[in-house]
Amino acid sequence: MLKWALIFFVISIVAGFFGFSGISAATATIARVLFGIALIIFLIFLVLALMAGNAVL
């Protein structure tokens, strides 16, 4: 998911460079949403791993 966020971020920068502000804003929003989702999933798995580690000990 982070890979797709990075791809959309690069597309956003390239589109902004060439003056396509609408496409740039849309892809930046998509990249931000994907990064947020990936961050939330990471935090969920981190909490689950910590809980599982405590259960083993």
Image: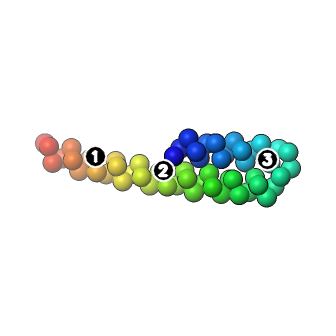
Which element carries disc 2, helix, strand or loop? helix
Which residue bears the numbered disc 2? 38
CA gap, disc 3 and disc 1: 40 Å
CA gap, disc 3 and disc 2: 24 Å
In this rendered view, identify the residue nearer to me: 46 or 4: 4
Counting from the top left corner in percent of width and height, residue 8 is at 65, 47
Instruction: Examine the rendered structure and indicate whether residue 18 appears above or below residue 27.
Output: above
Q: Which of marks 3 and 1 is nearer the N terminus?
A: 3
Which residue bears the numbered disc 1? 49
Task: Give the quarter of the figure containing the C terminus.
Answer: top left
Residue neighbourhood size for the residue with mark 1, other residues' Cα within 10 Å, grouped as few (<14), some (14–19), many (≥20) = few
Residue neighbourhood size for the residue with mark 3, other residues' Cα within 10 Å, grouped as few (<14), some (14–19), many (≥20) = some
Counting from the top left corner in percent of width and height, residue 42 is at 41, 48
Which residue bears the numbered disc 3? 15
Which element carries disc 3, helix, strand or loop? helix
Furthest residue in direction left, as rendered: 57
User: Which amino acid, mark 3?
Assistant: Ala
Which element carries disc 1, helix, strand or loop? helix
User: Which amino acid, mark 1?
Assistant: Ala
Q: In this view, does 4 lie to the left or right of 56?
A: right
Instruction: Give the total number of marks visible in the rendering.
Output: 3
Counting from the top left corner in percent of width and height, residue 3 is at 56, 41
Q: In this view, does 37 lie to the left or right of 44?
A: right
> Marks 1 and 3: in contact by CB < 8 Å?
no
Q: Which of marks 3 and 2 is nearer the N terminus?
A: 3
The colour scheme used here is rainbow
